[in-house]
Image (cartoon, coloured by chain):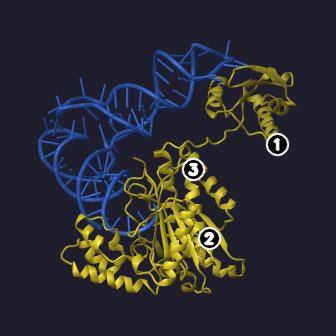
Chain colours: A yellow, B blue
Amino acid sequence: MPKYARLKGTQDILPVEQPYWEHLRMRVAEIARAYGFERIDTPIFELTELFNRGVGDATDIVEKEMYAFKDRGGNEIALRPEFTAGVMRAYIENGMQVLPKPVKLYSIGPIFRHEQPQAGRYRQFHQFNAEILGVQDPLADLEIMLLAWDIYDSLGFQSLAFQVHSTGCPICRPQYVSLLAEHYRAHADAICDDCKRRVAVNPLRVLDCKQPQCQPIIAGAPKMLEHLCGECAAHFTKLRGYLEHLGKPHTINPRLVRGLDYYTKTVFEVWAEGIGAQAAVCGGGRYDGLIELLGGHPTPGVGFAAGMERAVMVMQAQHIAVPPLPAPLVFIAFLGDATARHAAQLLRALRQAGLGAQIAMGGSLRSQLRQADKSAARFTLIVGEDEIAQDVVTLRDMATGEQETAPLNGVAQTIVERLG
RNA sequence: GUGGCUGUGGCCUAACGGUCAAGGCACCUGUCUGUGGAACAGGAAAUUGUGGGUUCGAAUCCCAUCAGCCACCCCA
């Protein structure tokens, strides 16, 4: 047992896993850029207050999952439990409201939540995140949803499902919530203990309860979609119209609710198979009141967050092939201490010529060739006393085993020629 | 925060409560004094997660604790 072990809920992403991560990061960046999103990086920690306000005091994330502490200067700070609050802070602080609308941003990086780890759930995990700011039209909702979908689609994910719902706005939601609470109070004896608590704390959450006894109560509950105000209803209808016109398969899920307070109108999730009980690989929605809440000019916004560990798990579960990370083209082996400096010089020359190269660091020629083999280099250069004496080097093609003698000065050129 | 299952070299696995915890993979070296991928031989690598307890004797039984996995809660 090692003296130091990684902390609960954290993980080491080892070299063998990196091809998945690299492929995922590349796809996210490629597609986000192609869709007009620009990258923004914000700090991993912020004032705790920002998350309290932005995410919502009453949410589980803020109440019991935040890594919040006092720093050496006495500031109350927290490791970010999500991206959006920090991105909104940056938008306001950097005067980005003067940018032409829409402002389309994406981020990638670590997120921290003190939760009980399980399949697809960690304390430090990674998300990619996207936001569109300054547009009220559901076209922005559509664009955000398409970005999320197309990233997974381009990765080759099978059995994806789009779940869509609307949670209304500050005008219609409170009325609906009281109707819902009333319905639950009328059936107080039939519902599970968790739901009794939920009705008091966050009534919308009763809708995604999985207890069998609650299912008939949920089925008989008033539907949010039937109680949207005119504006919210029109927004939702328009969004659905776009999705249908594009032939995007989606499920209207009247039980879809979000765990963060700032959502208004549209909420959605993307589900995929392969991560145990965690079906959601991505979740998001509209948050029209957030920027104003954080002290900015009233600005509508819509965005999503996607779990990267979960995406990697789906890739592996669905046997999605990812390209191997490129290895250095050339491996340099040498014989005898006197040749080491010539070998090092050759290494430098190859690198200056733009060829990926690495050098053996001792051992018999046999073991150096073993290293070369394992490094997946296409060519091995052998530098020995004999070669140095004649100003040449032995060039070995690792796939065929064929060897030739090449002039020391023009090795890079010779290698490029052999590449075809 | 709650519950279930599981902890043996880096990884996978074996060992009726009884000498020195065994094997495979991987790693290093050699057979091959200057030639990889195979084979063979050898080597390094474990106070059996940790701490207690029961016992003449514990990897094995009991308790606690930590961690991992899974599920709830919640979320990505």
Residue shown at 61% from the left, 57% from the top: A28
Q: Are marks 2 and 1 on the same chain?
A: yes
Residue flagged by tag 2: what amino acid is it? Thr
Q: Disc 2 and disc 1: Cα gap in Å?
A: 35 Å
Q: Can you tell which quarter of the image residue A272 is in?
A: bottom left
Query: Which chain does the residue under circle 3 lie in?
Result: A
Q: Can you tell which quarter of the image residue A120 is in?
A: bottom left
Residue flagged by tag 1: what amino acid is it? Gln
Which residue lies under the disc numbered 1?
A352
Which residue lies under the disc numbered 2?
A42
Query: Which chain does the residue under circle 2 lie in?
Result: A
Residue A418 in view: yes
Closer to the N terminus: mark 1 or mark 3?
A: 3
Closer to the N terminus: mark 2 or mark 3?
A: 2
**Image position, residue A391 (x, y; %):** 86, 25
* Nearer mark to the viewer, of 2 and 1: 2
